Image (cartoon, rainbow, N blue to C red):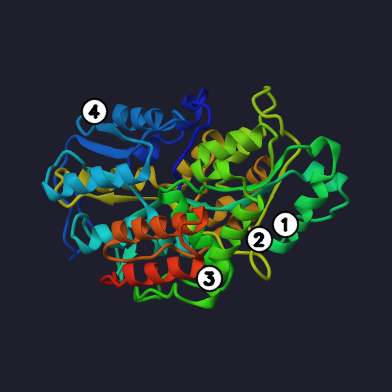
Amino acid sequence: MTTARTTRALRSAGAVLAGLAALAACGAPGGTVAAGKPSFEGRGPITYVAGKDATGSVQPVLDRWNKLHPTEKVTFIQLPTDPDAQRQQMIQNAQTKSDAYTVLSLDAVWTSEFAAHRWIDRLPQDRFPLARMLGPIVETGKYRGGLYAVPASSDGGMLYYRSDLLKRAGIERPPATWAEMTADCAKVRKLPEAKGMSCYVGQFQKYEGLTVNFAEAVNSAGGVITDPVGAPHVDTPQAKRGLDFLVHSFRSGIIPKDALTYQEEDGRRVFQAGKVIFERQWPYMYALAAKKDGSSKVAGRFAVAPLPGLKGPGASSLGGHNLALSASAGNKATAIDFMKFFSSEQLQRFTLAHAPAAPTYKALYRDPTLVKKYPYLPTLKKSILHAVPRPRVYQYGDVTAAIQREAYAAMTGSKNSEQALKDLQKALQLPAAE
């Protein structure tokens, strides 16, 4: 999941976007697909619907498309930054069978819900270069064997840490376990320059970010939230060990109480201000924290590593956004061509250079030029390949709300971990997506 992207607005888009001209112009005439398969018909104006673009990266891309397709222009509809609000507005549009929304930017975990309700169309797999993408990312766009969404970006959580302070404390490598992270924090806090610093923060406000952080804790302790067919398994010793890590960390002060109000941007600002040693965060923060224009006090003083777990490296939740086609939309031939353009390797290379996201294509992770410029890419690839999807269930809205409610209750002390997980197990007895 990516719920915040606050990189600087693009200032040099023109030259790179010019290189996308051929791709943007290569739409299949008439919207036909391979012989013997149904076509997606209709050409004309469409809309692209996504969360608010704080990066300034989307409109220049749409402008390029629109210049080359004057009769098939794309209008950008920006929804709120909060993913729960985005999902609700997309569902409302689908339930009214409105044609106002055409191409939807779905959080990767919403695919099963939207496909099961037939709010989005099954897509022609042969129109997209799925074999060139990382396997776990492609799977987020599938439901019951069919492709319902095309990966446009991915995301994996990483541990950002103050490499300078760990080195001064005599710590040679980043922590691989929660116990190591706690011990490292205690050593670093003894340094005069670390006085008053917090140890660890993530995203713990009662919103989708809490679902992500809870899922990572459970998965990193050897547990699961739901099995492959959607049945819940949270009333287990493994899940309890994961939740206990969060509960005990808040109780002991390893995680500051303020983090109960944190979304992505809150934690980013705290880390960049030099007030925390470790942070769980998405890759978008790397470029911002590395800025040497005075906006970041930790530029040149941090690095990234895989998330720690109970007995070794942990498991990230698999984030990202996929492109889906609203079932009630018109001009679907145009929509398919636009989705192919917007999810292309060439465009992702551009996006990585100007508004960093996690690419979906394998080649971009091994490109020497990109790896030199973005040294976090190898770690990010490992995070994605070992990531665990959030529950792929029919009623995802109910599932994430229940997770947030019970995890928050345990972290704030209104319930103990055992009771919270028993209540969550009961709440998650819902129809499975697959």
Name the mark nearer the viewer: 2 or 1.
1
Q: Are marks 2 and 1 in contact (CB under 8 Å)?
A: yes
Q: Position of residue 49 (x, y in %)?
A: 29, 39
Marks 4 and 2, how far apart in space? 50 Å
- Measure the C-alpha gap from mark 3 to mark 2: 17 Å
Q: Amino acid at mark 4?
A: Pro
Q: Pointer 1: what residue?
A: 181
Q: Quadrant of the C terminus?
A: bottom left
Look at the picture and state if 172 lies above or below 68: below
Determine which residue is flagged by label 4: 70
Identify the secondary structure beneath mark 3: helix
Against 415, residue 238 (above or below) is below
N-term mark: 3 or 4? 4
Label 1 or label 4, whichever lies nearer to me, is 1
Q: Earlier in the sequence, mark 2 or mark 1?
A: 1
Mark 3: give few (<14), some (14-19) or many (20+) Cα within 10 Å.
many
Q: Measure how far apart labels 3 and 1 are at the Cα level.
A: 19 Å
Q: Which residue is mark 2?
A: 308
Nearest to the eye among marks 3 and 4: give it: 3
* 3 vs 1, front mark: 3
Q: Which residue reaches farthest front? A: 414
* Tag 2: amino acid: Pro
